[in-house]
Image (tube, rainbow, N blue to C red):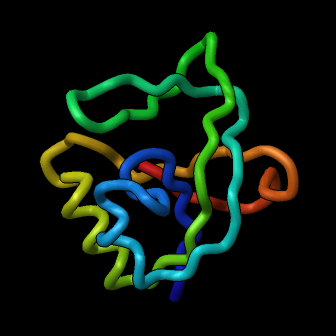
Amino acid sequence: MRTLVFVYGTLKRGGSNHGWIEKQQFVAEARTAPLFRLYDLGGYPGMVRAEDGISIQGEVWSVDEAGLIKLDVLEDTDGGEYERVVVPLEGEWAERTVEGY
């Protein structure tokens, strides 16, 4: 089973953590619905829902189960650094279920 995942920071192509996702399948560039803000967390960004949110540019990837496990480790979902949730996207992605951190 594969999951669509939206990435917006160091995981994007050319980013410092891209190696964690590079063996997965790039699908397309995309933008979030205007519901988020990015914050500098000291060397990497964090995307947070905000009342005064904007659209965030990123990429959609098709990730297999093993890849999701690796990404959850990188994003420290067990430790609470990030959580993986459904991220509303714009355009052709508006009706698709896409997750992000």
Horizontal side, residue 13 vs residue 89: left or right: left
Specify the quadrant of the image occupied by residue 48. Answer: top left
Residue under the image location 19 percent in, 52 percent down: 76
Depth check: give the residue in front, 22 or 80. 22
Residue under the image location 36 percent in, 64 percent down: 18
User: Which residue is farthest right?
Assistant: 92
Residue 44 in the image: x percent, y percent? 29, 38
Q: How many marks?
A: 0
Residue 51 in the image: x percent, y percent? 60, 13
Q: Is residue 1 above or below residue 39?
A: below
Q: Is residue 27 above or below residue 18?
A: below
Specify the quadrant of the image occupied by residue 54. Answer: top right
Residue 49 in the image: x percent, y percent? 52, 26
Horizontal side, residue 9 vs residue 77: left or right: right
Q: Is residue 63 above or below residue 5?
A: below
User: Which residue is farthest front?
Assistant: 14
